[in-house]
Amino acid sequence: LSDLIAERAAAILALEGPYNPDLTVGAIPVDLLTASASGLDPHISVAAAELQARRIAEVRGLSLDQITALINDHTEGAVLGCLGKERVNVLEINLALAQAA
């Protein structure tokens, strides 16, 4: 598990480094370093979405403000208002990104 996490951290630093030059392993949201039990979780943390925002904006030819708005629009609250944390639905935001491009 620690080897997988180290590999994922290195890949994230390589991918996101040009867009987030001050990024360190310690600042990578944990959900980007681990996987859900099924590997099919349709959500990521708001922090994980925000970390990727600059890269997604550049790749998609959109402004950072547009990406931030999409993140905000597709952020779901805690279940029943108290279980878990806010999260971003990856499928829904990817569909919105496809429409925005």
Image (cartoon, helix red, strand yellow):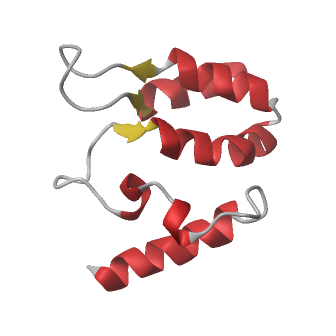
Residue 78 position, x and y percent, is: 27, 22
Q: Position of residue 2 (x, y in %)?
A: 31, 82
Residue drawn at x 43%, y 80% is 6
Residue 76: quarter of image = top left
Residue drawn at x 46%, y 72% is 8
**Residue pictured at 46% horizontal, 54% vertical:** 29
From the viewer's perspective, tell me whether residue 52 is left or right of residue 85.
Answer: right
Any part of residue 101 in sight? no
Residue 62: quarter of image: top right
Residue drawn at (77%, 64%) of the image: 21
Question: Residue 45: image x %, image y %?
Answer: 41, 40
Residue 76 placement, left or right of 64: left
Front residue of 72/99: it is 72
Is residue 44 visible in the rendered image? The answer is: yes
Residue 53 lies in quadrant:
top right
Please state which of residues 98 and 3 is positioned toward the viewer in this rendering.
Answer: 3
Question: Please, is residue 23 above or below residue 89 in the view?
Answer: below
Rendered position, 23 above or below 53: below
Quarter of the image with the C terminus is top right
Instruction: Indicate whether 8 appears above or below 70.
Output: below
Indicate the quadrant containing the N terminus: top left, top right, bottom left or bottom right. bottom left
- The location of residue 75, given as percent across then percent down, is 45, 22
In the displayed structure, does residue 15 sit left or right of residue 92? right
